[in-house]
Image (cartoon, grey):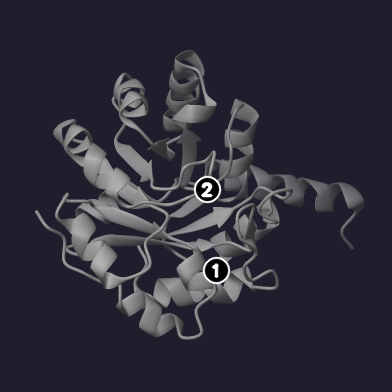
Amino acid sequence: MRNILDEIIEYKKSIVEAFKRKPISFVEKVKNNPYVSIISEVKRASPSKGDLNINLDPRTLSSEYERLGATAVSVLTDSKYFKGSFEDLRMVRESVNIPVLCKDFVIDKVQIDYAKLTGADIILLIVAALSDESLKELYDYARSLDLDVIVEVHNEEEVKRALKISPRIIGVNNRDLKTFKTDISITLKLAQMIKESGAILISESGITSKEDIETLSKAKIDAVLVGEGFVKSNNLDESFNGLRIEKNV
């Protein structure tokens, strides 16, 4: 009969193995995808829209995303404003074999450690929320753990700040974090500067139709992040397939 010490050691081994797990490369997935990559989101609520799908099942939804061809799954882990959790992230990690993004407001290394331990392959760093020093420190730390990092910007000044650390991935948030209004033309305005740097370009927020994707494709985007449109959809297959478009290279 196993004693308590044996049980504890077995549990600790599982924790250590989780931390040693080699993350799945989002960068390689995007580069090898002939289509505009779709990052599909597990999102229960938002400050601007309130509850979106508060009782969603992260396991089922993320599995459906993978079946449909999502390149990655984004999981909101903020509990107060988005009603997400790291438990949601853990369930998604156990359910899919594609990269998982921990989408949160990262301000400290300990959050990065916890994201990796819970199963994240990618983290988000928001330029507007960080000083240049903190941005570089957190970026370098995440990369040292083999995590991919989406560096999020909203305007030209933030792009210039982001480029100082030569990120491999830049996400343009079409949503103004002060007013929460969305405008996909923000990606179009910033695309050239980002693409010239060699970074993968992701357009985030406000993408609801194939027309939006076709417009953004002119800027040679590599990927889009879609949340609300999917979690509120009554026909996920139709909603997802309606956004599939070949990459404009």
The residue identified by callout 2 is 180
Left or right: 216 in relation to 125: left
Are the residues at dot 1 and dot 2 in contact (C-beta closer than 8 Å)? no
The residue identified by callout 1 is 95
Does residue 216 appear in the picture of this structure? yes
Mark 1 or mark 2, which is nearer to you? 2
The kind of residue tagged 1 is Ser
The relative height of residue 60 versus residue 201 in the rendered view (above or below) is below
Residue in the image at 56% along x and 42% along y: 116
Residue in the image at 37% along x and 27% along y: 158
The relative height of residue 89 versus residue 228 in the rendered view (above or below) is above
Asked whether 122 or 179 is in front, the reply is 179
The kind of residue tagged 2 is Phe
To which quarter of the image does residue 232 belong?
bottom right
Left or right: 210 in relation to 44: left
Residue in the image at 60% along x and 54% along y: 48
Indicate the secondary structure of the residue bearing disc 2: loop
Q: Position of residue 70 (x, y in %)?
A: 37, 67
The disc at residue 169 is none
To which quarter of the image does residue 241 belong?
bottom left
Q: Position of residue 233 (x, y in %)?
A: 50, 79
Q: Which badge, 1 or 2, is on the more N-terminal residue?
A: 1
The relative height of residue 205 versus residue 244 in the rendered view (above or below) is above
What is the crowding at mark 1: few (fewer than 14 residues within 10 Å), some, or many (at least 20)? some
Does residue 199 appear in the picture of this structure? no
Q: Position of residue 166 (x, y in %)?
A: 28, 25
Query: Farthest residue toward the left?
Result: 249
Q: Position of residue 236 (x, y in %)?
A: 45, 81
What is the crowding at mark 2: few (fewer than 14 residues within 10 Å), some, or many (at least 20)? few
Residue in the image at 33% along x and 57% along y: 224
Indicate the secondary structure of the residue bearing disc 1: helix
